[in-house]
Amino acid sequence: MTLPVAALVGCASAPSTAPRPTAPSTGSAQPTEAAADEAAVQQGFARWITSFRATARAAGIDDATLQVAFDDVHYLLRVVELDRAQPEFTRTVWDYLDSAVTPQRVALGQEKLLQVRGEADAAAARYGVPPSVVVAIWGIESNYGGNYGNIPTIDALATLGFEGRRDDWARGQLLAALKILQSGDIDRAHMIGSWAGAMGQTQFLPSNFLAYAVDADGDGRRDIWGSMADIMASTANFLARSGWQAGQPWGAEVQLPPGFDYGRADAEVRQSTTRWAAEGVRTMEGAPLPEFADGTILLPAGARGPAFLAGPNFRTILRYNNSTSYALAVSLLAQRLTDGPGVQAPWPRDLPALTRSQLLALQTALNERGFASGTPDGMMGPATREGLRRYQRSVGLPVDGYPTLDLLQRLQEQ
């Protein structure tokens, strides 16, 4: 679900017509070769659509919906290019937060919070999720409705299903999108979103729409594109049914005691606030820690960066988008929207993010030296973090599992 912009007054309006894709680029191929390749792709795509029509019909999609969905469906080369792209350069958490939680986004969010107060309060009363949290997700996902994508969802998912890299996933999402069309919640022209199939102002995948979208304004349609009541309620319902605990904060920035074992700053290490406090964990301003039965210490930039005590609601935001940087951005933006503080401890801005190639080299070096980190793929995950921690422990470094250029060089020099 993330990150062009039209002003939003009251309710956002989706474009009146779905954009039509441009023809695929031909690259460096000769004109006749390019034409033949394009013709082959289009013929294959048409065959795939014919086959999927039969599958969808057997799953209960009526012929009228199939006609609307597929009679003018387009293969979108750009969607395939984006899906296959693996950016070489990664982002640090502070770089992400610098762009996601800007003073401008905070100020605009405070204005939007006032504009949608009635709808957001109604959603909060029904689902127990504070208006600031729902508005923060709205802000991160689409800049408060300013940019929620303009790619036809049916075209995007059909393209991904035909392309085949994520065939099962795309077919399931496409079938869900057809069910949405058949229900009458939205017409095809207005069912638009990102290249990956996420839709509307808070970027629901079609399967999540079917599971969590709400008709809060009572007009008989679940409209996450244009109805602020439906947008607020649907987003709050998603969080509530994903484990949101009413009345609890997401967490707080904290100070760690001298000698803290950074290896315990791990999502799997959960304990009560009382136990964390007994170990010397304190808030930045000396106020009581949030009361959690199973809080975790979060070090998104390693031992040199800020520390946070995160609770169950932080983990619920991760179910919306399983990225620590994303969940922290939502949490901090929600905090700022209600005049709370931003991050107070400094980020280690002198540490560059490792590129994917460098992460791949790091994983390979860890494996070669007996610190198993899984199959090298150039992406940080739990296995790589654990392998890195074992290496750090073996050489007497802070065991934070945070990848740095210095660690990579140490491993390569050994």
Image: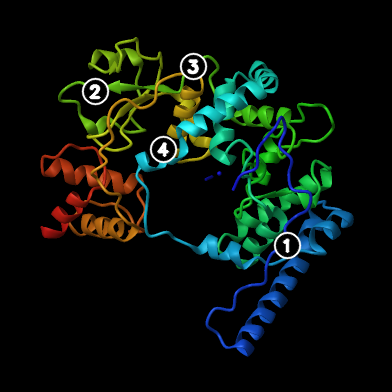
Mark 3 belongs to which amino acid?
Answer: Gln
For image coordinates 53% across by 37% down, the residue present is: 140
> Do the residues bearing badges 1 and 2 touch, measured as CB atoms within 8 Å?
no
Q: In this rendering, would 187 be left or right of 394?
A: right
* Label placed on residue 97: 4
Indicate whether 183 appears above or below 339: below
What element does badge 3 sit on? loop
For image coordinates 56% across by 40% down, the residue present is: 141
Measure the alpha-carbon separation of dots 3 and 2: 22 Å
What element does badge 1 sit on? loop
* Label placed on residue 256: 2
Residue at the disc numbered 3:
248
Q: Nearer the viewer, mark 2 or mark 4?
A: 4
For image coordinates 82% across by 52% down, the residue present is: 61
Measure the alpha-carbon separation of dots 2 and 4: 22 Å
Q: Residues within 10 Å of mark 2 (few under 14, many from 20)?
A: many
Spot occupied by residue 182 in the image (x, y as percentages of width and height): 83, 47
